[in-house]
Amino acid sequence: MADFLETTVDKFIFRVATDCHYNSEGLWVRQVGDQVRVGLSDFLQQRSGDVAFVEIKPEGTILSAGDEVAVIETIKVNVSLTSPVSGKVIEVNPAMEMTPEAINQDPYGNGWLAVIEPSNWEADLAQLLDAQAYLTLMKGQAEEEMKKQ
């Protein structure tokens, strides 16, 4: 099980898995052998609201970093999610069809979106944030949102 960094903003607690890297939008990437698993950070899933529907690019889709990998629909918003890495979608989480709420319940575990076979992992990794850098970015974003309310 992953270790977590944690921060509290107002009454919200946000966790960041230390075994993942993140893009600035809040998608995480966890290396698993020669592949990477992709999902939503705790902050992104909390900010978006209860996930009602997920549409993930099908297996075999070739993506560049920044291409849309999935769309989530929540009560609040529809969010287009961009892939943190370039590569080929080799597996889509089958649980997303029947239980998309797994994203909210277990964002770093059962709530993953897809497994991607990266085409240029080292270059993509260099563009991603480690857990501490993402925690700092995310905390700033959360504090900004609190000021707006």
Image (spheres, grey):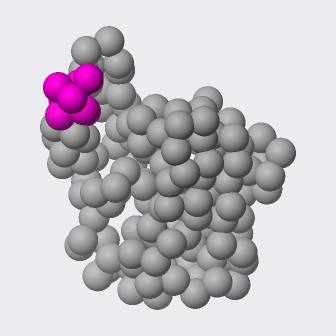
Instruction: Verify whether residue 147 appears in magenta.
Output: yes
Residue 85 visible in the snapshot: no
Rendering quarter of residue 4: top left
Q: 62 and 118: which one is in front?
A: 62
Residue 49: in sight, yes or no?
Answer: yes
**Quick one: quadrant of the C terminus?**
top left
Q: Is residue 6 magenta?
A: no
- In the picture as drawn, the residue positioned furthest to the right comes out as 98
Q: How many marks?
A: 0
Q: Nearer the viewer, residue 51 or 62?
A: 51
Q: Is residue 101 left or right of residue 10?
A: right
The x, y position of residue 113, in whole percent, is 62, 57
Query: Main SS of the magenta segment?
Result: helix
Q: Position of residue 92 (x, y in %)?
A: 71, 64
Q: Residue at x 77, y 41 (%)?
A: 99
Q: Residue at coordinates 25% horizontally, 15% vertically from top-left?
A: 10
Which corner quadrant of the image does residue 114 belong to? bottom right
Residue 116 image point, x, y percent: 57, 73
Residues drawn in magenta: 142-149
Q: Is 126 located above or below residue 103 in the figure?
A: below
92 left or right of 140 in image: right
Residue at the spot 52% in from the left edge and 83% down from the top edge: 63
User: Is residue 31 left or right of 7 when viewed as pictured?
Assistant: right
